[in-house]
Image (cartoon, grey):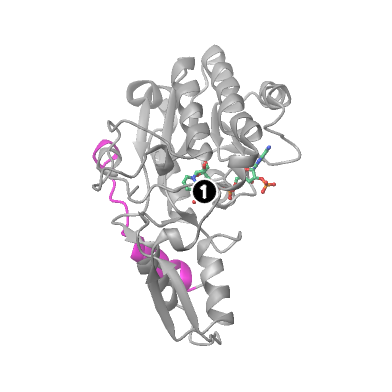
Amino acid sequence: MKILLLGSNGQLGYEATRTLFCYGDLVAVDYPDIDFTKPKQVTDLISEVKPDLIYNAVAFTDVDKAEQESEKAMLVNSHTPGEIAKFCKVNNVPLIHFSTDYVFDGQKNALYVEDDIPNPINMYGKSKLDGELAIINSGCDYFIFRTSWVYSMRAGGFVKKVIQWSQQNEVLRIVDDQIGNPTWARMLAIISTSFIEKNKGNIRKIFHDNNGVFHLAGGGYASRFEWTKTIIKYLSEDLIIKVKDIIPVKSNEFPTPADRPLFSALSCQKFEKKFDMKIPHWENSLQLMMKH
Ligand SMILES: NC(=O)c1ccc[n+]([C@@H]2O[C@H](COP(=O)([O-])OP(=O)(O)OC[C@H]3O[C@@H](n4cnc5c(N)ncnc54)[C@H](OP(=O)(O)O)[C@@H]3O)[C@@H](O)[C@H]2O)c1
């Protein structure tokens, strides 16, 4: 089986490269070899590779920048995934794609399930929802995995920022009114590819029979404040840190160009039931990652 992974240098794509290469002939590419602002360049590359499966980890993920660069966010998160999906429909190639908890407005105050009505409150969420719809409307066979608060030690994400802040400051002020599922990129890569091995012989059928949107993120949920305290709890004792106090504050203390949904935690029960898997609790994943 030939697998094409788009976005191999991102948090998820880097980890997915390390799981997908076990399942077939892997072609893993990233910017500038593929540029999602140039949809034809991307579909030309796909035609050349002739994959049996596409795993798309490319996204415009800078939530605040997306407000200013909305055209680019729409191209990368919606238009080009839509063109890829059209290719997949015509050529009968299954597609794995990722979306976000930010398709919701955060007003539900309970775990979001797949049937809840999306209502994004920022440009990033709008562009990702548009991407979901473009894929669904193409008629191709797809899994869209909505995830949340993805972290790894690679990029400048939240965990790395907290470590840096704790080395530089005695007091950290962290919002406690934003709730989500911290999701370790490696866990997401392993779980989002695990069903491939089980169904290698009939990969097209498994997609065709189970097509859909699934929530797939760290188990349980936390506020950014709880997440921060837990990151610091698991820091290596060798690391010299300054931080003595972590103070919970409200989001309005840190105005940002993009609004964030307050409670956007996802329920992943649909995925767990369908694929007979148990998603690890976010704290267990974090503890494992912090050991390295
Ligand atoms: N990060 C989160 O907290 C979060 C939360 C919810 C959902 N998600 C979703 O989960 C998936 C994986 O996210 P992630 O955290 O792994 O993202 P990431 O680390 O930002 O990686 C995104 C990848 O896309 C590439 N990319 C961006 N613009 C591109 C373009 N114009 N052409 C080609 N490649 C381009 C990036 O390349 P460069 O590095 O070269 O720009 C990078 O390799 C995405 O679908 C995202 O929307 C993420």
Q: Is residue 263 magenta?
A: no
Near mark 1 (Cα within 10 A), the count class, few <14, some 14-19 or many ≥20, is some
- Tell me which residue sits at (50%, 66%) in the image: 159
Q: Is residue 278 magenta?
A: yes
- The image quadrant in which ligand 1 is located: top right
- Tell me which residue sits at (56%, 16%) in the image: 86
Can residue 291 be spotted in the picture?
A: yes
Residue span colored magenta: 272-291
Horizontally, residue 170 falls left or right of residue 112, namely right
Q: Is residue 134 above or below residue 243?
A: above
The picture places residue 55, in percent across and down from the top left corner, at: 54, 35
SS at badge 1: helix
Q: Is residue 150 above or below residue 46?
A: below
Can residue 1 be spotted in the picture?
A: no
- Tell me which residue sits at (76%, 40%) in the image: 32
The picture places residue 117, in percent across and down from the top left corner, at: 31, 30
Horizontally, residue 139 falls left or right of residue 108, namely right
Q: Is residue 253 above or below residue 43?
A: below
- Tell me which residue sits at (49%, 84%) in the image: 243
Q: Is residue 89 above or below residue 195?
A: above
Q: Residue furthest right?
A: 32
Q: Quadrant of the N terminus?
A: top right
The picture places residue 12, in percent across and down from the top left corner, at: 54, 49
Q: Which residue is more in the foreground, 86 or 264?
A: 264
Q: Main secondary structure of the magenta part?
A: helix
According to the picture, the residue beneath numbered tag 1 turns out to be 19
